[in-house]
Image: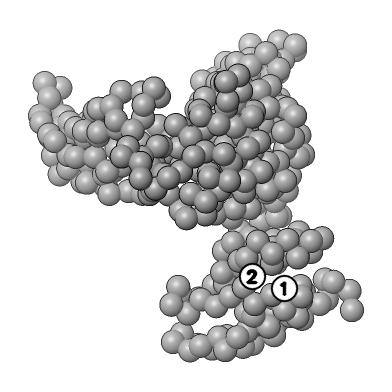
Amino acid sequence: MPLGDAFGAAAERTRRSVKPPGGRREGAGTRFVEETFGLPQDPLSAGALAAAGPFRPMVRLGALATGAALMPSDAQAGPLDKLVKAVKGIRAWHSSPYDFDKFDMTKIGTGQGAQTYGHGIYAAENPAVSGLGGQYWKEFARHPAVQPVDPDEKTALHFLRMTDGDRAAAIRMLRPAGEIGENALRILESGKHVGPHTYEVNIRARPEEFLDWFEPLNKQSKSVQAAVERAGYPVTGREVIQPRGHDIEFRLRGESRNMGQSATRLRDAGIPGIRYLDQGSRYVVGGQHVLTELKPNGKWEATIRVDRSDLGFQGPGTAFTKKQFATKAEADAWASAEIAQKGTSNYVLFRDDIIDILKKYGLAGLLGGGTAADLGRAPPE
């Protein structure tokens, strides 16, 4: 039987075995995994995923295509549900001056190039950081590699920068310009690509597998703690001051202070990369709402204080985040929501074989990798 037919038949058997809400799966997930991929009982084990071998793309495809139909509540979740969640991984975004179809570790440093949080491929959970029109998209919009030679394309890119990558807004701004902006307007309306490239990606790993840059070692997952020791970082269990992720990464660089060396050692020990709260999260999550006051401009300003002494050399220990609203109730609600949120992280990958491009966005929107339904929908910013 062809693999596609086998996948469909097994998926159908799984669906038929799912009982109404409140029912049990009675091993459907385990049968699906075993019959289709010959995997062991625990589909989350490293051996199970490795055993999938060439079938991994089909596992990912099936998870993305049928995940919504197969997902029960957490209480009802069986092995298949865990597998679907696992293979779906971490959804993230990556912006770049360059157009490519596959990530490549040998190209590290050719984009933004800072590599502040380790040597690897950077991706962000929050599209406001690295999605279309996000922080890094705006930075790359001025990168030499994306600057057009054609003057009309330069004008088009200029208006896209002014609208943070919103092509429809740029078109509205150009229309009143008449003949002066006619050619640039035609470029934007045609959908021709201008400027940086944005990629929506799936990282085939779980957050707890990554070395957290800011967290103390004893608060990180057991798998990370064990891997850090295998990487050569001395762990006695009697540390008075617990090392944080950035302490460990720095120490593993060796005397040469080579970030590539620390990345290799951690990767070979089983850690796929580093994660850290993005700037918009680390200065509000877990903070204190210390003040809401009426300002001279008639607006109410809420202030959140965050103790981030764990940032070390990456920033100030204490930070204040402020935002103004029309009413005190709105300001208080914003502060409460910001403090309570889980936050979003950025990821630094030590491997290029665990990141898949799901969709590729140009300034016109979706360029490839999506479904027909996606073609009429704006990028998820």
Q: Is residue 367 above or below residue 23?
A: above
Q: Is residue 298 above or below residue 379?
A: above
Residue 154: name its quadrant.
Answer: top right
In the displayed structure image, the side of residue 36 where residue 73 appears, left or right? left
Q: Is residue 191 above or below residue 332?
A: above
Q: Inspect the image, locate mark 1, and give the three-letter code of the amino acid beneath it.
A: Leu
Which of 335 and 202 lies nearest the eye of the viewer?
202
What residue is at 14 percent from the left and 35 percent from the top? 290
What residue is at 36 percent from the left and 30 percent from the top? 311
Task: Please identify the residue farthest to the right as the structure is shown.
Answer: 1
Q: Which mark is residue 39?
A: 1
Tell me the SS state at disc 1: loop
Q: Quadrant of the N terminus?
A: bottom right
Q: Residues within 10 Å of mark 1 (few under 14, many from 20)?
A: many
Which of 123 and 127 lies nearest the eye of the viewer?
123
What residue is at 67 percent from the left and 13 percent from the top? 144
What residue is at 61 percent from the left and 34 percent from the top? 263
Q: Residues within 10 Å of mark 2 (few under 14, many from 20)?
A: many
What whole-number distance in Å separates the C-alpha atoms at marks 1 and 2? Answer: 7 Å
Tell me the SS state at disc 2: loop
In the displayed structure image, the side of residue 373 where residue 319 appears, left or right? left
x then y, percent, for residue 364: 66, 35
Which of 315 and 61 lies nearest the eye of the viewer?
315
x then y, percent, for residue 373: 66, 56
Q: Which mark is residue 150?
A: none
x then y, percent, for residue 111: 65, 23
Q: Which residue is mark 2?
A: 43
Q: Inspect the image, locate mark 2, and give the three-letter code of the amino acid beneath it.
A: Pro
For residue 239, say whether it is visible: yes
x then y, percent, for residue 273: 58, 41
Q: Are marks 1 and 2 in contact (CB under 8 Å)?
A: yes
**How many marks overall?**
2
